[in-house]
Image (cartoon, rainbow, N blue to C red):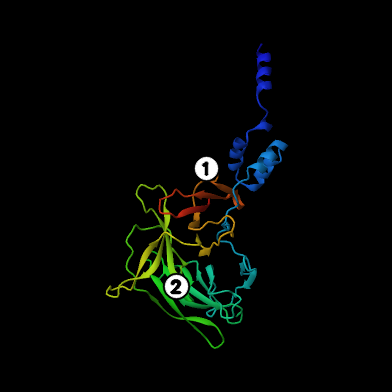
């Protein structure tokens, strides 16, 4: 009797190859790599057809380089949009080796007046060199006790943002007879102190709407579980005030999306009908997390396996109702 009952139950159960599309989609959504998703599609015709009908989310817009603290021999800058490659000179004015954390262009690298600016990993030095000026190499500006967390060119001027105290430093640049750029002076701008909570992560600086702007990620709301980014732009105050500038919050980026990370921070123009997958008034950011790789959050949109079993997963932040959407790309480990 038990055998007959067992046979009846087995014959009445739908085969695993006929799993509903929505259930199979949930399974594929939880897989950590593209390779595993392709393996699922290769199981049988039914699963392959379901995979074609329910496409996984697009690959992350940000690719985080996982090998922290590891470097290759030659340093190159590559621009994916214009397909340019620029060799970064090793020679330095003071012959002192350093590791560069961020390198930025003053303008298009095809311009004869383009300058590279960089900061080292400690944020204690700001460096300059001329694109194509391999003989002149780098010149160094020692910050003498200040720590620069980020740098950006805005309207051709170089600015640096110091960690913790949010001082915006403006650098004056001159050019030697041989074309070598040098920082001749630096001075912090007179800015009203921003009122708000303290933060753990360093702020980012970038140009938005032609003005120096900064991004700060912290716990802005007491009842909000996770920290999130707010954006501030530099505006002038009344002349009667003892300070000339203040930071004003921005919640409308117009036709731009923001990309924020330890090695880059930039406002990217998103025209209508282009840049598939990018959305205006969105913040795409990189974040480190101590989350174990086998315990990813339940609301992960996309994940992929990197070297040494590290994961990069995409997660949409909970909305705070300010009209700005935030999407994080978290690197585990």
Outermost residue to the left: 240
201 left or right, relative to 180: left
Above or below for 216 versus 295: below
Residue 332 position (above or below residue 12): below
Whether 162 is drawn above or below 57: the answer is below
Relative to the observer, which residue lies in front, 82 or 77? 82
User: 272 or 47, which lies in front?
Assistant: 272
Q: Looking at this rendering, what residue extends furthest in the bottom direction?
A: 177
* Secondary element at image label 1: loop
Give the farthest residue toward the front: 272
Q: Which of disc 2 and disc 1 is earlier in sequence?
A: 2
Query: Is any part of residue 261 visible from this angle?
Result: no
Counting from the top left corner in percent of width and height, residue 124 is at 45, 71
Question: Height in image: 324 above or below 139?
Answer: above
Quadrant in which residue 147 is drawn? bottom left
Q: Residue at x 30, y 75 (%)?
A: 239
Q: Nearer the viewer, residue 70 or 43?
A: 43
Whole-angstrom CA distance, mark 1 to mark 2, is 40 Å
Residue 1, position in %: x, y?
A: 66, 11
Q: Tell me the crowding category of disc 2: few under 14, some 14 to 19, or many 20 or more residues within 10 angstroms, Cα based.
A: many
Percent of width and height locating residue 214: 43, 64
Q: Residue at (70%, 36%) from the top-left corner?
A: 46
Give the number of callouts. 2
Q: Mark 1 Cα within 10 Å, few/some/many (few <14, many 20+)?
A: few
Q: Inspect this view and state whether residue 139 appears.
A: yes
Which label sits in the foreground, 1 or 2? Answer: 2
Q: Nearer the viewer, residue 254 or 333?
A: 254
Q: Quadrant of residue 79?
A: bottom right
Q: Mark 2 = which residue?
A: 159
The residue carrying mark 1 is 295
The numbered mark at residue 212 is: none
Contact flag, marks 1 and 2 (Cβ < 8 Å): no
């Amino acid at each position: 009797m038990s055998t007959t009952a067992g046979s009846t139950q087995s014959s009445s159960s739908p085969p695993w190859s006929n799993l509903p599309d929505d259930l199979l989609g949930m399974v594929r959504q939880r897989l950590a790599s593209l390779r595993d998703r392709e393996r699922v599609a290769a199981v049988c015709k039914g699963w392959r057809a379901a995979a074609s009908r329910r496409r996984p989310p697009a690959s992350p817009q940000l690719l985080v380089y996982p090998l922290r603290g590891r470097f290759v021999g030659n340093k190159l800058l590559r621009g994916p949009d214009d397909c340019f490659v620029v060799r970064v000179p090793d020679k330095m004015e003071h012959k002192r080796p350093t590791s560069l954390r961020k390198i930025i262009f003053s303008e298009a690298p095809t311009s004869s007046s383009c300058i590279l600016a960089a900061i080292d990993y400690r944020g204690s030095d700001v460096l300059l060199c001329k694109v194509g000026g391999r003989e002149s190499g780098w010149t160094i500006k020692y910050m003498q006790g200040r720590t620069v967390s980020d740098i950006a060119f805005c309207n051709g001027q170089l600015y640096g943002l110091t960690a913790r105290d949010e001082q915006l430093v403006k650098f004056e640049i001159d050019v030697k007879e041989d074309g070598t750029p040098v920082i001749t002076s630096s001075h912090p701008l007179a800015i009203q102190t921003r009122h708000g909570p303290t933060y753990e992560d360093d702020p980012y600086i970038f140009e938005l709407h032609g003005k120096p702007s900064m991004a700060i990620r912290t716990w802005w709301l007491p009842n909000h579980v996770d920290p999130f980014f707010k954006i501030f732009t530099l505006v002038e105050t009344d002349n009667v005030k003892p300070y000339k500038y203040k930071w004003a919050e921005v919640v409308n980026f117009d036709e731009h999306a923001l990309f924020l990370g330890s090695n880059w921070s930039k406002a990217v123009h998103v025209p209508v009908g282009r840049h598939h997958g990018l959305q205006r008034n969105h913040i795409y950011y990189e974040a480190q997390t101590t989350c174990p790789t086998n315990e990813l959050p339940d609301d992960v949109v996309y994940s992929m396996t990197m070297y040494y079993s590290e994961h990069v997963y995409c997660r949409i932040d909970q909305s705070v109702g300010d009209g700005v959407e935030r999407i994080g790309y978290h690197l585990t480990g």
